[in-house]
Amino acid sequence: MRVLIVATNRERAPLPVVPIGASIIASVTKEEGHDVRFVDLMFQRRPKRALAEAVQSFRPDAIGLSIRNLDSTSWLKSTFYLDDAREYVRIAKTGGVPVIVGGPCLGVHPGGITEYVRADAGVWGDGEAAFPEILRRIERGQPFDDVPGVVTCTEDAPPKVNPQYRVEDLGELARPRVWQWTNFRQYADRTGPLPIQTRRGCVFNCSYCTYKFIEGDSYRSKPVEQVVDELREMKEAFPGAPVEFVDSTFNVPLPYTIAMCEAIAEADLGLHLHTSGFNPAAVNERLIDAMTAAGFSQVVITPETASDRMLRSLQKGFTVRSLRKCAQLRKRAPWSVLWVFLLGGPGEDEETLAETFKFLEEEIPSEDMVFLQPGLRVYPNTKLHRDAIAEGLLSPDEPLIRPFYYLSPRVPEMRYREILVEEIAKHPNYTTIKDVLHPFFPLYLRIAGGLRVAAPISRAAGGLSKLASIGLRRPGASV
């Protein structure tokens, strides 16, 4: 069969993200013996035309569209993506063949999203087994509405959502080899790293998070030796490119992460490694030293708050004491670090906000970046969803396809903005989504990419200070 795989994500802030999920599905589909064409819409000037031309010229027997996110998840600058996705589905349907959607966002709301974009079917959870089975059914002219992980819609009934399929042995999966499916140089030119996923699942119960819906509530990990081999292959395919670990919680389980980092260090690959899922709940000296020896240079740490009351509210699974330990141990490492904080969760008030900013003042060095995000995107079936309903802020019938943001009513909306302006004025290393939307930011990325500098999001303190000194960055513009 001829199978067209389309990566629909076009969001480039703060960095363009390489479509690892769509690349894995393309690799699996190719291994099944199908003729695969891959279309990445990220850098297409006319994405709708590019998709239409691919459908017309390739004449596929089936089309799979990967949808990464519902929206930008930012209260300060909210952008909804599913209307574009629905238009891509409409164009794909001109080919007269089944159109199947998948991607991380379907794990959030599988039936609602499949129905909204008007696809013939959706796949949620691990698509590596579900999608090939769908293709086998299409090839035999058989229905596929009973395949695990498949979502189907009819006009006169609610969407049918089958239980997810889970790949238990990640070592059996095809490698994404994103450079075979995308023009990776376009990502590298904007400091985008090569992605690697070493585990799936999450054991935490954060009140706002959807990782458990997408990947499950227990960990499934690749063999350490396979991780090392994949990294070696990446180095050979794209020398000098940084590699980012895209696991939902990079350092949990802790023993696995330490063993993996020590194996990478032993292999002496000389790679620049990044991770964006570092959890303060599981940190010790051995981990920090192993990561440094392995080659980690850029780390995103995600405490979300530095108030014990708010940590309990958000069900983060650690305390401020653990967070302080993490901040102290971080100083052992010569990393560039970005700390992420969410403001305005249930119970947030002036006192808890003050506790968070006091921690930042005391524990975070000025060379580290701090990303501040007021407002929490509410997703279906989360504790935050139930909290918002209980407080009368949200109707139980609201499908939450379009974004709704929770902001604690104990603090006036304008006060959140005032606090951000005050803190950013004092601390140039504090930032928000508005800074990465600055007109100069894409140029900044292109220059950094051209110089082969590591992704600069966590190294932007100096640059932001310079912009402020010449009047191109005003604290008020960041909120």
Image (cartoon, helix red, strand yellow):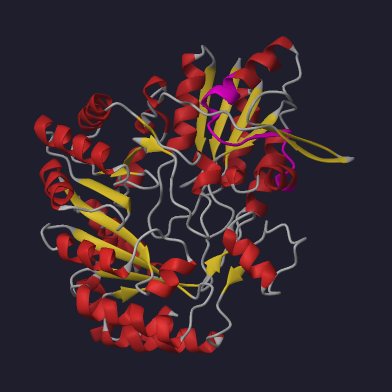
Q: Which of 265 and 241 is in front in this view?
A: 265
Residue 462: percent from left, percent from top: 20, 73
Q: Which of 260 and 286 is in front in this view?
A: 286
Is 192 magenta? The answer is no
In-image side of 161 versus 427 (left or right): right
Can see residue 342? no
Is 126 magenta? The answer is yes
In-image side of 82 versus 346 (left or right): right
Residue 133: percent from left, percent from top: 62, 18
Q: Nearer the viewer, residue 105 or 149?
A: 149
Q: Which of 258 and 430 is in front in this view?
A: 258
Q: In which quarter of the image is residue 159?
A: top right
Q: In this view, does 398 lie above or below 265?
A: below
Residue 19: percent from left, percent from top: 44, 40
For this orientation, the residue located farthest to the right is 156
Q: In this view, does 352 lie above or below 47?
A: below
In-image side of 19 versus 387 (left or right): left
Residue occupying image coordinates x 65% and y 29%: 56
Can see residue 195? yes
**Can you say which quadrant of the picture contains the N terminus?**
top right
Q: Give the range drawn in magenta.
A: 116-132
**Can you say which quadrant of the picture contains the C terminus?**
bottom left
Q: Quadrant of residue 223?
A: top left
